[in-house]
Amino acid sequence: MPFVLDASVTACWVFQDEEHPLAGLALDRLTTDDAIVPALWWFEVRNILVVNERRGRVSESVTRTFLRHLALLPVKVDPVPDEDQVLRLARAHRLSVYDAAYLELALRRGCPLASLDRELIAAASAVRVTPLA
């Protein structure tokens, strides 16, 4: 079954000191299932990488290699969210619009959500979106 993947989980795959069991589980699941992401995921992942290049945590070479490997994974981009639903979720659960986009996608597709963001996980639980397990 496909699952919605957020940038917080994806970031764990590049930073050795941010290992998390959920990140490992999500990566393992990609051997049998697709991940679905909102279009903003593309920007979020690259922003995380560039910010951490500036901090000296990763090099441009690491970024390039990671993005090359990431492109080989079965991650499908869902380009158009339900705008009204994203705004409703953001308002109702005090989420950023970015986080609400992940939640809206999981709701619309009926998929589990892989996230490490506490507020997003709490909102997902409130609307009965299953966490990736």
Image: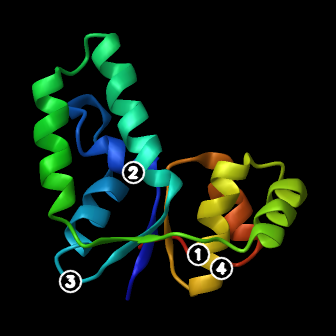
Q: Residue 5: percent from the left, percent from the top?
A: 43, 63
Distance of mark 2 from mark 4, alpha carbons? 19 Å
Which label number is shown at residue 125?
Answer: none
Residue indicated by mark 1: 106
Q: Amino acid at mark 1?
A: Ala
Q: Amino acid at mark 4?
A: Leu
Which label number is shown at residue 107?
Answer: 4
Residue at the spot 76% in from the left edge and 49% down from the top edge: 95
Distance of mark 3 from mark 4, alpha carbons? 21 Å
Residue indicated by mark 2: 9
Q: Left or right of 24: which side holds 100?
A: right
SS for dot 4: helix
Circles 1 and 4: CB distance less than 8 Å? yes
Q: Amino acid at mark 2?
A: Val
Q: Which tag, 3 or 2, sits closer to the chain's start?
A: 2
Residue indicated by mark 3: 32
Residue at the spot 24% in from the left edge and 46% down from the top edge: 13
Q: Amino acid at mark 3?
A: Thr
SS for dot 3: loop
Q: Left or right of 112: which side holds 19?
A: left
Occupied quadrant, residue 21: bottom left
